[in-house]
Image: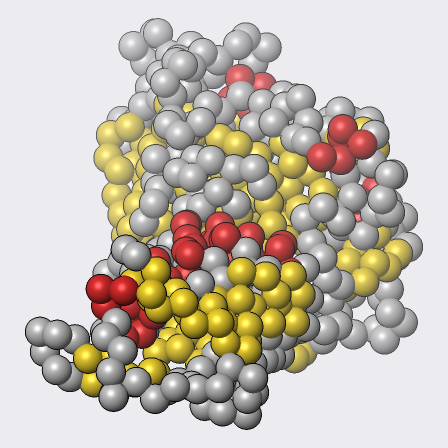
């Protein structure tokens, strides 16, 4: 069971049952998919149980987040640039006895943001197709102070990069509907190797079906399963219009719809024709003219860049040319709202570095989600530079003062190469001053006061003396190792009694070429070992 909990399953899926106790992963009977507890993906929240009779097992437990503005699941491993389907499922079921379903936000990545409004006793499932921008995908619940955020399940599915070309580095797709017309059955894994959920839909339409397979090519950008395409719906007469509810959203939301077709009836006699006109009815009509589906072969029509419009409902309608003998038909449909990438995620090197710092110090801060994005949820103690949106955000300031830190300074800090300010003051840090701090290229202010660190000096003091670094040291054990060629003992050197811990150390250096003075201070309490005559 341990292996099941720490790896993707054999299909390459991550399937999480939120709130499930450790060691109690299970394999779902219908799909054969393995669900694991969520403890390896999240470190906040509380687990609850709920009476969910008639619902899948994954809805019987949940995790709730009464504390913190943003709490996140860290889904990894993922491949940066890889394409993924991410689903989040919710079931309230009056677990708290308050009879008040919460409202909150769901963030998948940094740009797909969804308002979650839950019914009292029914489940909700939300799905996004997106290209991973980092080596992890964050699924975050944001408290909007309209009830405690909850979650029941998270599912991650890797997709081939050629699928859904409309989902890319510049935009993601929020699923509105994935319909399998002509049947009441639902299909997902293993019939669909990517575990897309095809909801059966018949309604009052006429059903067309076949037992013959429907072919598709290996490079088909949608890879609809043959079992889905073997059924379709139509209407009784060529004079009628076939209308489908496609998407619901705000007036300016952009709709992307994919209509999946395969002709299931043999139209070889000349008097059997089905030539369709397809209208996307939103703020304006999109018309696809003179379309006939190929016989027993998968085909797809896309409607792109269509606004939902003032009605907040986007429908698709189909009619046939007046010379057609058969009414319109359709096999399946997927519809999405397009979520543009408006904020870039934090630089990946900075993300890895700050996560390394968090792990090294076992920090209990609410450091979850992307460190810099959204701007309203920047991690405590961080400041970021966003470069006006033209480049990935960088961490430029890290304040871990008075954080109860012990031990040394982790090497992960060396990878925060845009850092200008580092404050580690008033902790219990000890050991030698690491050379990599002096080598941080952008560092301007370093505060190490209130620790017990021994400072070697050559690189550090060189940066301090030439004004490139401001150092606040406070109480330290200090070894000042100065190259002889850089120091001229003269009347301008004011000696300090090393045994007088209350003295301020003032060193004034006279450069033989410039005769200017540089002064730096290391605070009030200091143990000094001055070695200024070393031959360099």
Across and down, in percent, residue 2 comes to 80, 32
Residue 84 in the figure: left or right of residue 468: right
Residue 332 in the figure: left or right of residue 76: left
Task: Say if 300 sits above or below 500 in the image.
Answer: above
Task: Say if 201 sits above or below 63 in the image.
Answer: above
Residue 490 in the figure: left or right of residue 217: left
Task: Say if 101 sits above or below 508 in the image.
Answer: above
- Asked whether residue 311 appears in the rendered view, the answer is no
| Residue nearest the observer in this picture, 183 or 125 | 125
Which residue is pictured at 83% across the width and 30% down the height? 1
- Asked whether residue 98 appears in the rendered view, the answer is yes
Across and down, in percent, residue 525 comes to 55, 86
What colour scheme has been applied to the protein in the rendered image?
Answer: secondary structure
Question: Which corner quadrant holds the C terminus?
Answer: bottom left
Which residue is pictured at 54% across the width and 8% down the height? 212
Across and down, in percent, residue 125 comes to 64, 50
Quadrant hosting residue 463: bottom left
| Residue nearest the observer in this picture, 277 or 43 | 43
Which residue is pictured at 44% across the width and 82% down the height? 522
Q: How many marks?
A: 0
Which residue is pictured at 71% across the width and 35% down the height? 6
Residue 236 in the figure: left or right of residue 42: left
Across and down, in percent, residue 388 comes to 25, 69
Q: Which residue sits furthest left? A: 513
| Residue nearest the observer in this picture, 31 or 207 | 31
| Residue nearest the observer in this picture, 35 or 302 | 35
């Amino acid at each position: 069971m341990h292996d099941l909990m720490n790896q993707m399953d054999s299909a390459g899926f991550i399937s999480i049952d939120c709130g499930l106790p450790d060691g109690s992963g299970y394999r779902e009977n219908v799909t054969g998919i393995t669900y694991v507890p969520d403890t390896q993906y999240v470190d906040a929240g509380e687990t609850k149980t709920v009476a969910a009779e008639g619902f899948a097992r994954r809805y019987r437990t949940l995790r709730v987040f009464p504390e913190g503005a943003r709490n996140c699941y860290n889904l990894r491993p993922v491949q940066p640039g890889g394409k993924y389907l991410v689903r989040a499922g919710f079931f309230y079921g009056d677990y708290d006895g308050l009879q008040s379903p919460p409202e909150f936000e769901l963030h998948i990545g940094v740009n797909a943001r969804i308002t979650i409004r839950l019914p009292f006793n029914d489940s909700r499932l939300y799905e996004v197709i997106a290209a991973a921008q980092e080596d992890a995908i964050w699924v975050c619940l944001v408290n909007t102070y309209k009830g405690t955020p909850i979650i029941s399940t998270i599912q991650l599915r890797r997709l081939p990069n050629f699928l859904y070309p409309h989902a890319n580095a510049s935009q993601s797709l929020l699923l509105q509907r994935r319909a399998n017309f002509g049947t009441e059955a639902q299909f997902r894994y293993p019939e669909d190797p990517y575990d897309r959920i095809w909801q059966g839909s018949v309604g009052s339409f006429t059903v067309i079906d076949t037992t013959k397979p429907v072919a598709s090519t290996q490079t088909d950008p949608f890879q609809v399963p043959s079992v889905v395409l073997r059924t379709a719906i139509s209407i009784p007469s060529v004079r009628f219009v076939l209308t489908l509810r496609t998407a619901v959203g705000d007036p300016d939301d952009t709709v992307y719809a994919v209509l999946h077709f395969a002709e299931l009836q043999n139209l070889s006699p000349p008097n059997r024709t089905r030539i369709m006109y397809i209208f996307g009815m939103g703020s304006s009509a999109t018309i696809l003219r003179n379309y006939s589906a190929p016989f027993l072969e998968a085909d797809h029509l896309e409607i792109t860049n269509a606004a939902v419009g003032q009605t907040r409902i986007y429908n698709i309608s189909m009619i046939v040319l007046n010379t057609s003998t058969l009414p319109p038909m359709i096999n399946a449909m997927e519809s999405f709202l397009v979520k543009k990438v408006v904020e870039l995620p934090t630089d990946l090197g900075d993300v890895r570095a700050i996560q390394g710092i968090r792990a090294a110090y076992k920090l209990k801060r609410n450091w979850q989600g992307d460190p810099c994005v959204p701007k309203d949820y920047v991690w405590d103690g961080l400041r970021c530079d966003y470069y006006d949106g033209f480049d990935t955000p960088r961490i430029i300031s890290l304040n871990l003062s008075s954080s109860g830190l012990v031990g040394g300074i982790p090497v992960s800090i060396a990878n925060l190469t845009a850092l200008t300010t580092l404050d580690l003051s008033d902790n219990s840090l000890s050991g030698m001053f690491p050379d990599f701090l002096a080598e941080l290229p952008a560092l301007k202010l370093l505060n190490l006061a209130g620790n017990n660190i021994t400072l070697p000096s050559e690189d550090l003091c060189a940066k301090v003396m030439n004004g490139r670094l401001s150092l606040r040291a406070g109480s330290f054990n200090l070894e000042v190792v100065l190259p002889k060629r850089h120091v001229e003992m003269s009347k301008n050197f004011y000696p300090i009694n090393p045994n007088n811990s209350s003295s301020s150390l003032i060193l004034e250096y006279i450069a033989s070429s410039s005769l200017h003075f540089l002064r730096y201070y290391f605070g009030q309490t200091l143990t000094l070992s001055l070695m200024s005559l070393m031959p360099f």
